[in-house]
Image (tube, rainbow, N blue to C red):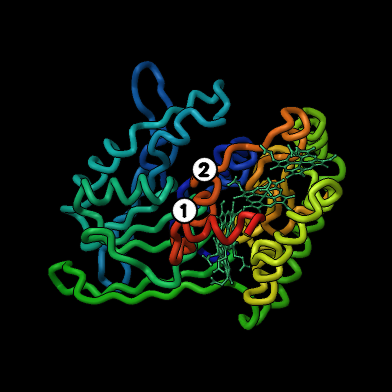
Amino acid sequence: MARMGVDATTPGPREIEEWDLFNELVADGRIPVVSSNLYREVEGERIPLWQRHLILDVDGVRVGLFGLIGGTEFAGAAVPVESGVRFQDAEEAMEEMIEELRPQVDLVVMMAQMSSRTANDLLTRIPGVDVALYGNRPSFKPEAQWVGETLVNQTGSRGQYMGSVTVIVDPDGNVIDSGSFNKPLLDPIPKQPEMLARAEEADDISKELRRTGTVEADRQEQAALATVKYLGAETCRRCHAAEYDHWKTTPHAGAFATLSSDHGMERTPECTGCHVTGWEQTGGYVAGNNKPDLTNVQCEACHGPGTEHVRTGGSTPMAEATCTGCHSGEFAKDWDFGTYYELVRHDK
Ligand code: HEC
Ligand code: HEC
Ligand code: HEC
Ligand code: HEC
């Protein structure tokens, strides 16, 4: 960030999870952190951790930036207790920031590290933000959208996309026109040799950390703790050959290939989740450690992890919610439970 010359960034749940590392990185002050609702309490007084807002002059337009984490999703999240860090209610902080910034600037920009739903809700209830930029695993949208009177951009996560929002402001500070584009950082964006070298260097450091450090230890501990495991369709096939053969004919059996062939997106966390089995579940699909093969939407995506089946002798009851974890949002398409259900049950 320092090398790219960013003007501002606001911490999200990932930074909170790696609190010590994050603090070490920002300690030299080269990364301008803005946070409007993280504070430390000292003798009953709220001391902000960083600047609560930032005012920039961009070609004569005064831009006020503030950054929120919240709403309640991360309140108290893994910040070490001894740090004394507290979260101010996001809504309260937002109102304070708008009141302070509005008289001083032409354009108010909010950086939001919270679910898109919470952020949309805040923007619809509290007017006064011109542009909002969403963090915390927002889905990828090719263009910015309007939420009430606010232009909202969601560029996807993990630095895998580049986003651009342009706003044209008249001399009275009214937004009179805007444009935007977001792009995945895949080819054909040319790789810069210097950046590539730095990426490889970072990759080496990360590998070394994994080899020696806590990452591997944590994972082994998790694996040992996990009694629930996904077994993969090949195991189910041994006793349920007919269901297996039918499943093979459904698009679910090829869902992972769809990602790689159409978009080269099979390693993109925003995409993989619904195209694999047991995403972010104990004993489920893990990128880079995919044993047994849990790519594609296999039996256990609908029936639940196999070890549970063995233990209970039955399957997880199949309600519409089994499907709508994946068949939702922009991928809901022509979703109709009844029609879709008939296409996946095996006795048809
Ligand atoms: C060792 C053999 C065996 C394996 C392996 C096996 N099952 Fe079964 N499964 C059974 C038997 C036996 C039944 C009961 C059949 C019956 O009642 O007609 C059953 C029943 C089921 C049912 C219906 C349960 C119900 O409530 O009606 C589902 C769903 C199911 N299995 C899914 C799976 C899945 C998914 C896997 C792989 C993770 C799997 N099974 C692996 C033997 C097996
Ligand atoms: C783990 C995520 C996931 C779950 C759970 C899931 N699906 Fe799907 N489903 C997908 C994906 C991804 C595709 C697209 C596969 C492809 O085309 O590559 C798909 C495709 C389908 C299709 C084919 C649609 C078409 O356009 O041909 C049907 C039908 C379907 N699902 C029904 C269901 C039903 C019914 C359930 C619940 C009982 C369900 N799915 C549960 C992810 C899921
Ligand atoms: C919330 C779950 C979910 C996520 C996240 C998801 N998909 Fe899917 N995807 C689905 C479902 C469900 C379908 C099947 C829709 C249908 O046919 O009814 C599908 C279908 C597809 C298809 C088949 C053709 C089409 O457009 O219907 C492609 C290609 C695809 N997804 C690519 C992606 C890519 C690329 C990403 C990441 C940007 C992604 N998916 C993320 C659930 C998801
Ligand atoms: C998209 C969701 C989905 C997937 C994936 C899926 N099933 Fe099913 N399965 C169903 C539905 C729906 C039923 C019917 C339940 C009902 O209506 O009684 C069913 C029923 C079953 C049954 C009960 C007997 C029967 O045939 O009705 C078995 C056994 C079973 N599935 C095994 C499997 C196996 C093995 C796989 C993987 C090879 C698999 N299923 C993949 C949705 C799924």
Q: Write the residue at 24% across / 40% down.
A: 96
Residue 317 position (above or below residue 238): above
Q: Write the residue at 34% across / 48% down.
A: 53
Which percent across, then down, holds residue 154?
43, 61
Which label's residue is closer to the chain start, 1 or 2? 1
Which percent across, then down, holds residue 201?
78, 61
Residue 190 position (above or below residue 348): below
Taking the image as shown, residue 34 lies to the left or right of residue 16, namely left
Tell me where residue 316 sits by quadrant.
top right
Q: Write the residue at 66% across / 65% down.
A: 250
Taking the image as shown, residue 199 lies to the left or right of residue 79, namely right
Camera-side residue of 53 and 132: 132
**Which element carries disc 1, helix, strand or loop?**
loop
What amino acid is labelled 2 in the image?
Ala
Q: Write the residue at 69% across / 76% down.
A: 261
Q: Which residue is label 2 attached to?
A: 319
Taking the image as shown, residue 33 lies to the left or right of residue 272, namely left
Camera-side residue of 197 and 333: 333
Residue 168 position (above or below residue 116): below
Which percent across, then down, holds residue 27?
57, 43
Instruction: Tell me if the residue at label 2 has its CB under 8 Å from ligand 2.
Output: no
Does any portion of residue 288 appear in the rendered image?
no
Tell me where residue 169 sits by quadrant.
bottom left
Contact (CB < 8 A) between labels 1 and 2? no
Camera-side residue of 90 and 201: 90
Specify the quadrant that holds the N terminus: bottom right
Q: Which residue is label 1 attached to?
A: 135
What amino acid is labelled 1 in the image?
Gly
